[in-house]
Amino acid sequence: MADSIQYHRVSDTPELVISDALYSDYQFEPHYHLDYHIGLVIDGVQRQQFQGQSVLLGPGRISVMPPGEIHDGSGYDNSAYRMKTFRLSPALLDDYAEDIFESNRDHDFGGAMVENDLIAQRLLSLHRQIQQTRTLSSVEVEELWLSLMAPLLSQLCAIKPKSVNGGLSTLHWQQVKDYCHANLGSKITLEQLAALCGLSRYQFLRRFEKTCGLTPRSWLIRLRLEHACLLLRRSDQSIADIAATVGFYDQSHFNRAFRLAYGVAPSAY
């Protein structure tokens, strides 16, 4: 059985991308996103690892990964599975959260597995409607979206990210992220990042991995790819220009890294 992965852009909402995929051989290595991912398996089972635990995602369960949450994904017992996802920007989630909650409620939470067959079925219905219409702003679609986000966000807001002991301080971690975002198109070295924190390269490497679960190199490649995803759906730049903008030294390197991360070429995203 061959893998089949399709991404669908939403014409009136560039802050949202949906996908529909059948995974047989493809495996997600540990990675993160810059936006929120809501995933549903409709056939088969996916095994996920995040926050030091291994969980199974099957029909009736909903996987919600906020920005920065390190997780992976593979077929359970070497079997194929079919999965649908919503990929929505923090700005889009903020917009709906402000509509749903009367107060400026904090919706910071860690990765979560939500067990709710009713919400899962309604999310699948919403996914089908968006896929068919390519729009989010129609009355029917937006009504369903808001009615689903309310109970889902209410449950998730009670879940807080776990703190990390022995890693980078909150200030140093933010400084590293800010520096990488600001210099994404340039060469970034381990020495530069360690200097931001007043650490040796070895100290920085160990504390970085403790903080986020990836090496600096893996984390930075993912950051470049995630920004490339934003540019692919929001700009008219060529793929070669996007590759250069996010710091890849040539288009072929960018194409290989993108296909490895998302299962499709940049032109199919």
Image (cartoon, rainbow, N blue to C red):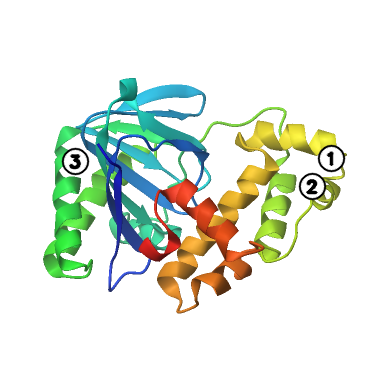
Label 3 vs 1, first from the N-terminus: 3
Q: Secondary structure at mark 2?
A: helix
Position of residue 226 relative to residue 219, above or below, is below
Judge whether residue 159 can be spotted in this image: no
Judging by the rendered image, the residue that carries numbered circle 1 is 201
Judging by the rendered image, the residue that carries numbered circle 2 is 190
Q: Which residue type carries mark 3?
A: Ile
Which quarter of the picture shows residue 214?
Answer: top right
Label 2 vs 3, first from the N-terminus: 3
Q: Is residue 267 left or right of residue 150?
A: right
Label 1 vs 2, first from the N-terminus: 2
Judging by the rendered image, the residue that carries numbered circle 3 is 119
Which quarter of the picture shows residue 188?
Answer: bottom right
Q: Residue 228 appears at what percent x and percent y?
A: 52, 63
Q: Residue 116 appears at what percent x and percent y?
A: 21, 33
Q: Secondary structure at mark 3?
A: helix
Report, in whole angstroms, how far the alpha carbon at label 3 lies from the one at label 1.
46 Å
Q: Residue 222 appears at what percent x and percent y?
A: 56, 50
Q: Which residue type carries mark 2?
A: Leu
Pointer 1 local density, CA inside 10 Å: few below 14, some 14–19, many at least 20: some
Pointer 2 local density, CA inside 10 Å: few below 14, some 14–19, many at least 20: some
